[in-house]
Amino acid sequence: MGPEPRDPTYDGDVAIIIELMAHTHGKALESQNVTIFHGGRVISEWNIPDKWYRLKGLLIPFSALSTDEHIELDIEIPDAESPKKFGGSDDDRKLGIGINRIWVGNINDPANVSSTLNIIGSRYVGTESRKTWDHKHLTGFWKSYITGPKVLDVGFSSYGDPRVVPIMEDAIGVDIDYPGYDGKYLPFGDCSQDAVYSSHCLEHIPDHLGIIQDWHRVTKVGGHIIIAVPSRDLFERRRRPPSSWNTEHLRMYTCASLLAEIEAALAPNTFKIRHLSENDDLFDYNLNPTMPPYGNYEITAVIEKIEAPEWRLVE
């Protein structure tokens, strides 16, 4: 791969982030191993465990860089296989990896950059969360809204995939089988959590307002509730239920309807909306509504719990 351009006047280490996708095939090929070479030396070995685009990082020291303005990398994929081997088609060409984007940057803080590059692409969270986890880490989203160790990841297990872990290292993953949880009231004390995170779960819940209220109950003042739901206009691509892609979806969301539910559930001046976004990164707008969506298609809202003032809104 390459060559990738770099600034020839810069005399420090260089960081490279590659957004790549593996070609896996169910349990027959659950992941792909990728080995990266620079100057004939192995500089990184990756395991890509799914078909989503993931970010992976490389750190190349200045001493290993050539004197020109290019960086050349070689990639080996030792376990790549063909569709023919898995019975998908008669094509016997081996499938490698897909590379979508590459970022090359100079390093001002080597220790911090090295730590960041080791983290991205390494956490196997739920399916939808996995699409954006690395970007949220790089942009400081997690640092801004998960400000303490006590975190609940509600509905985390991604349909029972045993490899899935909660959103953060110390977070508690809560599903319907969690001890003491009845699907309505979390078995945690009032104001006991730094953050509550839930991805692509709220649309499945009948008593959605009660659930939002309970998430608010267990969150500390100054803590955050992070809610991600599929966008009606991107994922569903229809105005009202039933969903074409998940029959368990009870509601469809726009930014406005998600905010309306939050406002209906929580008392004024007990919360503030700190973040609201609709993510269509890598979304394929060329696919019509009769075809499954591809890419990112979620709405994310962040609610900060605040101390309610003594006064109330005037009627």
Image (tube, grey):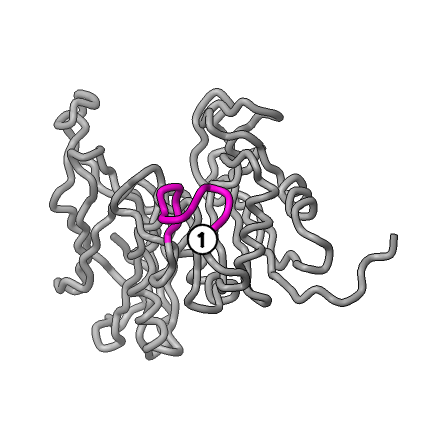
Magenta region: 173-187
Task: Classify residue 216 by image quadrant.
Answer: bottom right
Q: Amino acid at mark 1?
A: Pro
Q: Report the residue marked by disc 1.
A: 187
Going 77% across and 67% down the picture, which residue do you hit? Answer: 310
Going 17% across and 37% down the picture, which residue do you hit? Answer: 29
Q: Nearer the viewer, residue 57 or 190?
A: 190
174 falls in the magenta region: yes
Going 21% across and 73% down the picture, which residue do you hit? Answer: 64
Say whether residue 306 is left or right of residue 86.
Answer: right
Q: Residue furthest front?
A: 180
Q: Position of residue 61 (x, y in %)?
A: 25, 74
Vertical order, 124 against 195 (above or below): above
Q: Nearer the viewer, residue 155 or 144?
A: 155
Say whether residue 8 is left or right of residue 77.
Answer: right
Main secondary structure found in the magenta portion: loop
Going 39% across and 55% down the picture, which residue do you hit? Answer: 167
Secondary structure, mark 1, is loop
34 falls in the magenta region: no
Q: Position of residue 279 (x, y in %)?
A: 53, 45
Q: Position of residue 153 (x, y in %)?
A: 42, 52
Total numbered labels:
1
Q: Position of residue 300 (x, y in %)?
A: 54, 49
